[in-house]
Image: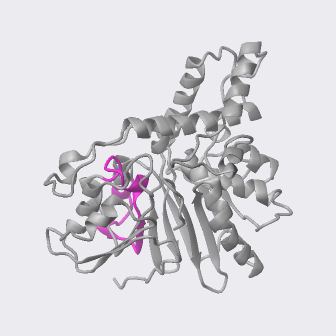
Amino acid sequence: MYPAKNGDAFLITENSSKPTAILIDGGYAITFQKWISPDLKHLAHLGHTLDLVVATHIDADHVAGLLEFFKVNGNSQAPKLIQVENVWHNSLRSLGSLTETIGNLTVDDKDLLSEIRRRGYPMPAGPEVEPVEISARQGSSLAALLLGGEYFWNAGNGTQSINSEEAPKLNLPDDIRIRVIGPSVARLEELRRQWVADLRRLGFTGKIGEDDVFDDAFEFLCAYDALRAAVQAQPTTISASTTLSLGDVYQSDNSVTNGSSIALIVELGSSRLLFLGDSWAEDIEAELRALPDATFPIVFDAIKISHHGSLHNTSPALLELIDSPIFLISSSGERHNHPDLEVLRAIVDRPSTFRRHLYFNYTTLASQQMHHYTAATGAEFSIYENATDWIDIEVREE
């Protein structure tokens, strides 16, 4: 779990006859340069490849580091850093063919698209912005880099979507199984409709088509939508002495960008991991309840909590369905004050036959408060802060 500021970046490796490596999100450009890149260089030196790279959704705190990675890596046929076997990323061309064609754009339309491209992705949170972030913000979208680099993207050239209803096949070793539990096709269609509406609202009057300029405009505008939705959803800070429960304060997320997050159950050998991106709790609840032969709660070997521990993305109903001895909470607390204390308390308050271990990649106000908290049921838990090195997952005996 890398130090990704207010974002996400995870590298999963599993030692077997053919070692596996999966990168889920990339934080910001500085996250890649300082921390992810050395690990990938080490993997490449050992002769390993990246079996899968996942961009869970279009939000700068998840994909800016991946932009930097694919810029550095270059063409997939002659990668400068490491070979990448599969990439999952839902961009404009992944969401179904557009009914419109490009047509002739007016001068104003071209100027608007140029300005959207120039602005690029939002800046990371924090008082100081490194020059590398300013550089990474502008330029190509992730879609453009994947197309230009000829990567095996969404089981082809990116024209399929990664969704919970029909995920493309992966070329992976037999002991690796990945089940997509989000987003639904309907959520992706909502994202596309919102983007079209945003483009029209900004004054675009021409026809929209499948051109690189629209790929860029799609990703950059979606990233700003995600930022705006997060700011609007900012909860009121609640003191450590509050008696309010998660049930008292929970309000479901309404960010369409977050709703488009790729959420995964990753099975490596006999271990089972749950990575939720920034997904909506209600969507994950529905997908889990639809799993064949599922008994609840499903105990995973590790769970990456949705949306950095926001109270808008972990509901009491979802916590009735999932549990784990290891919870991963990725956030520095910058910009949105994640994670929320109510979520952390709700995780540990449930009765349990095993000790829960909560890993934070930064020290935050909420993580500090948890050191002084006693679970309502007496369930045991441990708190680990600044956990940015390897976290060993021990397979739990059933």
Task: Report x, y in % for residue 41.
Answer: 73, 73
Front in this rendered view, residue 89 or 388 = 388
Please tell me in which quadrant of the rendered image residue 219 appears: top right
Q: Which residues are magenta?
A: 287-314
Task: Report x, y in % for residue 397.
Answer: 36, 85
Q: Please, is residue 178 above or below residue 62 in the view?
A: below
Quarter in which the C terminus is drawn:
bottom left
Q: Residue at x 23, y 49 (%)?
A: 238
The single residue placed furthest to the front in the displayed view is: 127
Q: Please, is residue 106 above or below residue 384 in the view?
A: above
Q: Please, is residue 21 above or below residue 279 in the view?
A: below
Residue 302 located within the stretch drawn in magenta: yes
Question: Can residue 142 be seen in this snapshot?
Answer: no
Q: Is 377 displayed left or right of 223 in the figure?
A: left
Q: Residue at x 39, y 53 (%)?
A: 287
Q: Is 192 displayed left or right of 19 in the figure?
A: left
Front in this rendered view, residue 58 or 381 = 381
Task: Report x, y in % for residue 284.
Answer: 38, 53
